[in-house]
Amino acid sequence: EIVLTQSPDTLSLSPGERATLSCRASQSVRNNYLGWYQQKPGQAPRLLIYDASTRAPGIPDRFSGSGSGTDFTLSISGLEAEDFAVYYCQQYGSGISPGTFGQGTKVDVK
Amino acid sequence: QVQLQESGPGLVKPSETLSLTCNVSGGSMSGYDWSWLRQPPGKGLEWVGYIHKSGGTNYSPPLKSRVTISIDAPESQFSLKLSSVTAADTAVYYCARGAWYIDHWGRGTLVTVSS
C-alpha cells in the first residue's frame, strides 16, 4: 500500500499570501494518479486537482498542482478567505486496492 | 448536476451490521464507479471500497472481510454493509462517485457504534 505523507501539518498564512503544500509518497505513484481535495468544517471534501495537475471543473486558477513520481505540490496563489481549510492528497489507480489519502494539511489564518 | 444522499441508522450496536444506502439523483448511474469512504471524528479520510461499473468490487484490505458494497442501478441506489462493527467504526460515512478521483460526494452521515 502506498503511504502518503503531507507537510506541514499546519500552515499559518495571511490572506493574499501564497500557500505551498507538499505530499510525498512511499513509492512512485503510477501515471501520477494524484488528487487534491479541500475540506471545510462540516462539509464533504471537494475535488480540486486530479492527475497531479489538472484542475477540476469550476476550480479557480489560483489553485495549481505539480509534481511527479513520489513528490507532489499543491500551490494556492493569493489566499482568499474561503481557502482556509484542510487539504488532502490522494493517490488512486493502483488497481490493487482503493486509493489512499494523506493525513491532511490545515491552512489557517495567521 | 448529480447529487448523492446517504441514509441509514445513526446508531449501531457493537457486533451488529452497519447498513447504509446512497440515493443518486440528477444523472444516470450507468457508466460510473461508486464508492464509500469514511472519516472518524476529527481524523482523516479513509476509502472503504468501491463498486466498478462492471459490477466488480474492490475493498480496503483492513476492512475486506467485513464489507459488502452492492448496487441497484434501476433504483438509482447503492449500498454499504459493514459487519461486526466496533467503536473504531464510528465515523462520518460518505457515498461518492468515482473509484479513482472522487468528483461528487454526498454530504455524509454520522454513524456511531455504541451500546
Image (cartoon, grey):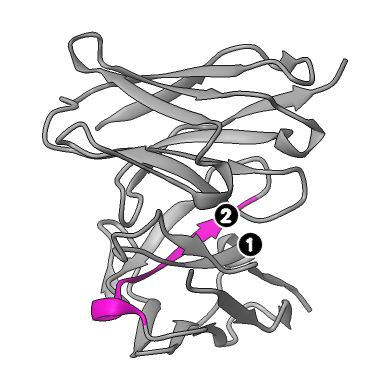
Side (left or right) of B33 relative to A25:
left
- In the rendered image, the quadrant that contains the N terminus of chain B is top left
Q: Secondary structure at mark 2?
A: strand
Q: Residue A76: in sight, yes or no?
A: no
User: Residue B21, relative to residue A21: is it above or below?
Assistant: above
Picture coordinates of residue B2, whole percent (x, y):
27, 30
Side (left or right) of A107 relative to B1:
right
- In the rendered image, the quadrant that contains the C terminus of chain B is top right
Mark 2 is surrounded, within 10 Å at the Cα level, by few (under 14), some (14 to 19) or many (20 or more) other residues, namely some
User: Residue B105, relative to residue A35: is it above or below?
Assistant: above
For badge 1, the amino acid type reads Ala
At 18% from the left and 10% from the top, the residue drawn is B74
The circle drawn on residue A85 is 1
Picture coordinates of residue A37, whole percent (x, y):
47, 61
For badge 2, the amino acid type reads Gln
Looking at the rendering, which quadrant does residue A64 occupy? bottom left
Return the residue found at the far left: B31
Q: State the extent of the magenta-drawn residues as a range.
A: A29-40
Q: What residue does disc 2 label?
A: A39
Q: Residue A39: in sight, yes or no?
A: yes
Query: Could you say which is closer to the camera, residue B4 or residue B95?
Result: B95
Name which of mark 1 and mark 2 comes first in the sequence. 2
The residues tagged by marks 1 and 2 sit, at their Cα atoms, a distance apart of 6 Å
Q: Secondary structure at mark 1?
A: loop
Mark 1 is surrounded, within 10 Å at the Cα level, by few (under 14), some (14 to 19) or many (20 or more) other residues, namely some
At 25% from the left and 16% from the top, the residue drawn is B76
Tell me, yes or no, whether the two marked residues, 1 and 2, touch with CB atoms within 8 Å.
Answer: yes
Looking at the rendering, which quadrant does residue A79 occupy? bottom right
